[in-house]
């Protein structure tokens, strides 16, 4: 098998790369309505590529938002079935002036593909399409494979839950495989074993019924910006613990074995600081940096505004101040419960000198894959096979809200097998994906199917 796969990849390398570039040329920005036609066009191309790769059927399927693409290759119904999830939509490319080349005109430089969506997630889900082709053409399929490539991941998958619920039978599988994350490095391969959950709220504080002269009224009327800033500052204590009552109640700590494995991830604090341009790191006392961004929940202000923001100075006591605030959650916190706690906190601690409106934006549940599961073991063996090293399990800091929904609806585990790197500039200007990683992924994925079928 191994030789047939590497031979096939060797013969088709250029085409595999060019086909990925074709996908990157379509500006499938899900957040912007002006790209609606591009979304459809991109979905159609994904469908065509699935058919070209050997799927028995592939379809562009409508949702209440952007369409999802479904494809399948059923070899023998009695064999295990792997559902590959990915997304063809991308983040908006702005600010455009910071890109060295057009975000939708892929450029190859120093062994990297530069384009929006190269790593997140077109380049990554497409590895699975090419891995399928490799297995079909070399007649080495060991599992049935289904694809669910959606178009709304970057806007929080608002319609996918309903879609999955309505198409449970179509999507039925024994495991779900996702390549939409990074590994530590090519030298230190790793596998994400979880994603954090999310609670996202907005708080608006209103003081007087209009902007006031700060000389005439300042000192007599509460300033909503000061009040909001104080409420936010009080969310962390001196040890940088979150003070919101009940916030940590349901936090599950990792098992001893998991903690031992997580500790293996190398971390160079000085390099980390240099890369970010900060003199000191910050975080919850009693935990390492890796723990703070993986196994612990956090609270961040994502934006804050109010008052005069134009040129020069204007002496005003503003009527309103607003902030967007989000928490990253870990097992077994519930997004719904934490959102309620956050909303209650801001409503209840506000002094009577202001009124507070607080509401929810969106949320998602945390997700964790057990390292002793059959799927994780297959992924670990596959990475060991092509990288020559056992991957380190890592808790991802980000969120993929659809994970908990997929598991709930389909009743199977999700395996994260990402081949990106943290330096890929996801959601930032000059997003890139290393061509070496792309080929390595195509080489590794067939082993996952083989080992999962054997396991
Ligand atoms: Zn993504």
Image: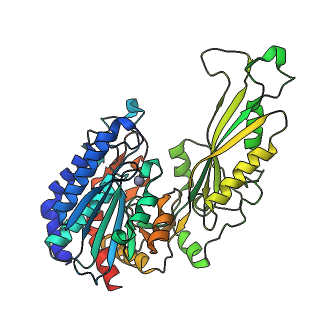
Rendering quarter of residue 187: bottom left
Q: Quadrant of the N terminus?
A: bottom left
For the point 63% across and 14% down, the residue is: 312
Q: Is residue 354 left or right of residue 441?
A: right
Can you give x and y, in whole percent of width and height, for residue 415 in the image? Answer: 42, 70
The extreme left residue here reads 11
Q: Nearer the viewer, residue 67 or 378?
A: 67
Q: Quadrant of the C terminus?
A: bottom left
Give the x, y percent position of residue 348.
Answer: 80, 46
Q: Quadrant of residue 76?
A: bottom left
Q: How many numbered markers are drawn?
A: 0
276 up-or-down from 205: above or below: below
What residue is drawn where x is 27% and y is 48%? 42
Q: How is the image coloured?
A: rainbow
Name the side, left or right, on which 440 lies relative to 411. Answer: left
Does the rendering let one see residue 357? yes
Q: Nearer the viewer, residue 343 or 110?
A: 343
In the rendered image, the vertical position of residue 267 relative to residue 360, given as above or below:
below
Q: Is residue 220 left or right of residue 192?
A: right
Q: Position of residue 298 (x, y in %)?
A: 64, 54
Task: Pick the residue in front: 143 or 61.
Answer: 61
- Could you tell me if residue 27 is visible in this image? no
**x and y percent of residue 424 in the render?**
39, 49
């Amino acid at each position: 098998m191994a030789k047939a796969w590497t031979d096939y990849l060797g013969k088709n390398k250029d085409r595999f790369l060019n086909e990925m570039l074709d996908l990157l040329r379509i500006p499938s920005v899900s957040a912007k309505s002006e790209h609606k036609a591009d979304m459809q066009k991109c979905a159609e191309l994904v469908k065509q590529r699935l058919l070209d790769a050997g799927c028995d059927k592939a379809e562009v399927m409508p949702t209440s938002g952007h369409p999802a693409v479904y494809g399948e290759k059923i070899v023998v119904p009695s064999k295990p079935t792997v559902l590959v999830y990915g997304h063809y939509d991308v983040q908006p490319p702005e600010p455009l002036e910071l890109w060295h080349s057009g975000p939708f005109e892929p450029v190859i430089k120093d062994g990297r593909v530069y384009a929006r969506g190269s790593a997140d997630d077109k380049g990554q889900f497409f590895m699975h399409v090419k891995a399928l082709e490799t297995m079909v053409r070399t007649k080495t399929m060991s599992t049935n494979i289904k694809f669910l490539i959606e178009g709304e991941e970057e806007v929080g998958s608002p319609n996918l839950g309903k879609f999955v619920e309505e198409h449970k039978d179509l999507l039925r599988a024994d495991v779900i495989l996702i390549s939409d994350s990074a590994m530590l490095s090519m030298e230190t391969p790793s596998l994400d074993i979880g994603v954090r959950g999310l609670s996202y709220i907005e708080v608006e504080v209103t003081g007087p019924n209009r902007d006031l002269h700060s000389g005439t009224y300042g000192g007599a009327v509460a300033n909503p910006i000061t009040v909001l800033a104080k409420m936010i500052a009080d969310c962390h204590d001196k040890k940088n613990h979150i003070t919101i009552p009940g916030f940590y109640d349901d936090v599950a700590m990792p098992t001893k074995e998991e903690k031992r494995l997580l500790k293996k991830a190398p971390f160079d604090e000085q390099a980390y600081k240099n890369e970010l341009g900060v003199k000191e790191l910050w975080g919850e006392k009693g935990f390492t940096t890796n723990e703070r961004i993986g196994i612990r929940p956090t609270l961040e202000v994502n934006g804050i505004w109010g008052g005069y923001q134009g040129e020069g100075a204007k002496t005003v006591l503003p009527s309103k101040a607003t902030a967007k605030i989000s928490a990253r959650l870990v097992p077994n916190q519930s997004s719904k419960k934490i959102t309620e706690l956050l909303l209650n906190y801001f409503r209840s601690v506000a002094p009577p000198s202001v009124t507070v409106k607080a509401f929810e934006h969106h949320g998602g549940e945390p997700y964790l894959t057990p390292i002793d599961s059959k799927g994780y073991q297959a992924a670990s063996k596959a990475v060991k096979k092509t990288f020559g090293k056992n991957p380190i399990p890592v808790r991802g800091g980000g969120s993929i809200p659809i994970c908990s929904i997929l598991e709930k609806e389909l009743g199977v585990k999700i395996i994260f097998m990402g081949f990106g790197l943290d330096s890929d500039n996801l959601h930032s200007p000059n997003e890139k994906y290393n061509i070496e990683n792309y080929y390595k992924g195509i080489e590794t994925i067939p082993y996952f199917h083989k080992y999962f079928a054997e396991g």
